[in-house]
Amino acid sequence: MGVSRDELRKLSSQIDYLFDLGKNEEATTLLKQALNDSADDRAYNLFFLGEAAGYLEGDSKKQKNYLLQAYQLEENDPYLVKNLGVYFLINDSERKAIKLFDKAIELDPDDFESFRNKGLALSNIGREKKAMEWFARAISKNPLDYDAMRQTGVSLSKLGKDLEAIEWFRKALLVNENDYDSMRQLGISLAMLGKYETSIDLLKLALSVNPNDLESKRNLRLVIRKMTGEGETFLSKALNYLGRKLASAWRRLVNQIFG
Amino acid sequence: MKAKSSYTGLESVSLSFSTKSSDLFKLPGNNATMGIINDLFDSGDPEEARKQLRSALADISQNLDKILAEEGRKKDHNNFNELVDTASLELNLGH
């Protein structure tokens, strides 16, 4: 085998990072390199073929096929197990994802990413308190896991605790000053507290790091609307208020039952 | 593949709009800094971009400290009001 699995995993992280920042050309070059480097390693080659199907072709079915084939070849490789879990998580199959993250943790109890991913899956189904427990575990394994710090903030924000959320977004930014997701979420939490000017600064800062971040653009427009009161009627405000109350009551109920 | 999630409580009931990047420059906030950082990232000078980013974040962070202190005071003030109300209630009941 020419290139070690550790190196292939590092390459995979770099590819994710570049695609995430919208640096598609650089990411595509690395992905092609990874396909080349993994030519002698069937399971990892299938994994990278899956990445190519997802990132380059946007073909989710093909991606799933490759990832499943890789998994069937090596059911006990924690990296392949975890990535199949991430596929299910991204495609709204949280229960399947959680089972795979549990298996990945069993195979590699030090893999903080699987702890964080399990938290993400729980947060997706509204179990914020449980989710935060898993983010805390990820941070205890890796005190520099800024993704877990940010996601703790996101969970707190979902629970309406924006002041506490802000502290977590700041912690994440102290570790990674380029984390545009934290900038965006910090901006959103500030807007929830009515601090619109600073919120706008942060959303624009997020866009300066990743100009393609649709969530920052969307929220920037929402903040402007809030700030100017544009398009807000008594009815829309009332519906908004009721919607938030209902969503928060639902989340509380789910947390009490399953939390 | 990497998973992450976002959340916004700012959602309005009806949302149909588009944001063109040119619109961003009409918005309040420090456009110059953001534009410079953006250009630096694009022109392949990530070190300088990061330097500018750090300085922008430090500026915002100072502002943030004031906001948090202010919000913290508000919270304490509300707690204080609750305490005062409770105290007055107890006094009234005592009489």
Image (cartoon, coloured by chain):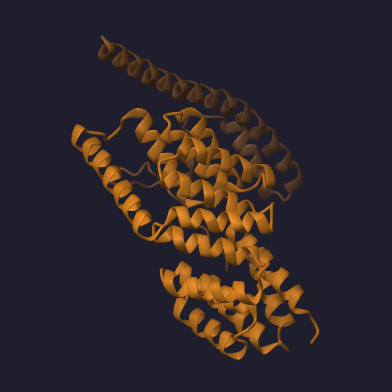
Chain A as rendered: colour = orange
Q: Which chain is brown?
A: B
Residue drawn at 56 percent across, 79 percent down:
A50
The residue closer to the viewer here, A18 or A105, is A105
Residue drawn at 28 percent across, 12 percent down:
B94
Q: Is residue A185 visible?
A: yes
Q: Residue furthest left?
A: A235
Left or right, residue B19 beside residue B64: left
In the image, residue B26 lies at what x, y percent? 46, 32
Residue drawn at 43 percent across, 69 percent down:
A94
Q: Residue furthest front?
A: B94
In the image, residue A179 lies at what x, y percent? 61, 48
Work out whether B82 lies above or below A112.
above
Work out whether B5 lies above or below A236.
below
Work out whether A54 lies above or below B79.
below
Q: Which image quadrant for residue A3?
A: bottom right
Q: Count of labels shown?
A: 0
In the image, residue A190 lies at what x, y percent? 47, 34
The residue closer to the viewer here, A133 or A21, is A133
Left or right, residue A185 beside residue A175: left
Where, quadrant-wise, is the N terminus of chain A in this rendering?
A: bottom right
In the image, residue B23 lies at what x, y percent? 45, 39
Work out whether A233 lies above or below A99.
above
Q: Residue furthest right?
A: A2
Q: Is residue A211 visible?
A: no
The residue closer to the viewer here, A131 or A28, is A131
Where, quadrant-wise, is the C terminus of chain A in this rendering?
A: bottom left
